[in-house]
Image (spheres, rainbow, N blue to C red):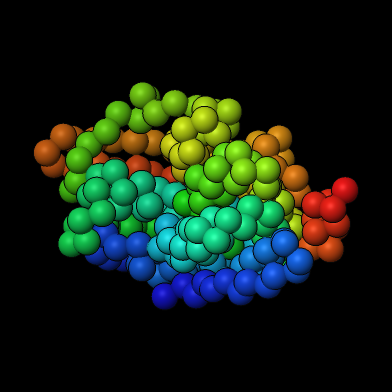
């Protein structure tokens, strides 16, 4: 099992750095380009949600990203100290509603669940929020 | 830092915004200001060319949702063109092809406005 860590501030300018971090490690783990693209997007969505909802765009929050992988699975865990939320109350995407309201919400979570094999949330209000995204490494 | 920029081309009364690079929560405001600029000038016939767009996240997709109704209320439209399979797949996954016309080429999208 290999473990890699990256800690960044809650700023959208760091999203590209986070994507590069995921990409280089997923390549090392043996994923193909399409799978890597899916993981990059899922992690981007998770971190965007942290910046937007947990830290409400306050730029000095901490986002801790840890990657663990072996020959069967690749897990990215994203942890923050911001405002907690209940993932169960985030609605499924509804495009007609977005059209009426001129905004989107919940798309990021839907993408994470669709693009990854497993998505797990853990929140200790006042302490931390943690989301773990896992993709299985399927060998042909 | 991810790079993103847009170039604007006017073709008759149609505005073509060409996207380049990475469209995420950091760069989405660049595209928003481009739409604001067009709407301020009452330009509502808009084609967005995705040919050089390498990446899009839901923050980028949200920009299109934010402006589409305003544009259509003014007898215009936002038509999308020249997406890579990778970018199209994200739009498709979220059901966007139901709400937006997506064309293989910029020329086809422009032509549709004159029909």
From the viewer's perspective, tell me whether residue B48 is left or right of residue A2: right
Q: Would residue A38 be seen by someone viewing this image from the given angle? A: yes
Q: Is residue A85 above or below residue A8?
A: above
The spot of residue A22 in percent (x, y) is 46, 63
Residue A121 image-quadrant placement? top left
**Which residue does the image show at 22% across and 36% down from the upper left?**
A84
B54 sits to left or right of A41: right
Q: Position of residue A69 (x, y in %)?
A: 45, 56
Q: Nearer the viewer, residue B99 or B69?
A: B69
As drawn, A118 above or below B58: above
Residue at 50% x, 75% y is: B3
From the viewer's perspective, is A13 left or right of A24?
Answer: left
Q: Nearer the viewer, residue A9 or B65?
A: B65
Q: Is residue A38 left or right of residue B108?
A: left
> Residue at 75% of width from left, 68% of height from top?
B11
User: What percent of the width, then of the height, locates residue A60?
Assistant: 18, 62
Whether residue A25 appears in this view of the structure is no
């Amino acid at each position: 099992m290999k473990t890699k860590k990256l800690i960044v501030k809650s700023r959208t300018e760091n999203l590209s750095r986070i994507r590069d971090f995921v990409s280089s490690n997923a390549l090392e783990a043996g994923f193909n380009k399409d799978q890597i693209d899916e993981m990059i997007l899922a992690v981007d969505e998770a971190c965007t949600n942290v910046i937007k909802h947990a830290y409400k765009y306050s730029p000095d929050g901490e986002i801790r990203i840890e990657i663990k992988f072996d020959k069967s699975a690749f897990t990215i865990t994203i942890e923050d100290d911001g405002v907690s939320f209940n993932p169960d109350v985030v609605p499924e995407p509804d495009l007609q509603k977005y059209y009426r309201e001129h905004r989107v919400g919940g798309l990021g979570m839907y993408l994470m669940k669709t693009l990854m094999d497993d998505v797990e949330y853990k929140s200790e209000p006042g302490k931390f929020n943690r989301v773990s995204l896992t993709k299985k490494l399927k060998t042909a | 830092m991810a790079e993103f920029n847009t170039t604007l081309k006017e073709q008759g009364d149609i505005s073509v915004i060409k996207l380049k690079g990475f469209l995420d929560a950091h760069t989405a405001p660049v595209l928003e200001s481009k739409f604001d600029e067009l709407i301020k000038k009452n330009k509502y016939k808009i084609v967005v060319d995705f040919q050089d767009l390498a990446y899009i996240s839901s923050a980028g997709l949200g920009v299109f949702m934010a402006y589409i109704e305003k544009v259509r209320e003014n007898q215009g439209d936002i038509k999308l063109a020249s997406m890579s399979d990778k970018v199209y797949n994200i739009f498709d996954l979220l059901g966007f092809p139901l709400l937006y016309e997506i064309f293989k080429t910029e020329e086809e999208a422009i032509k549709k406005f004159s029909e």
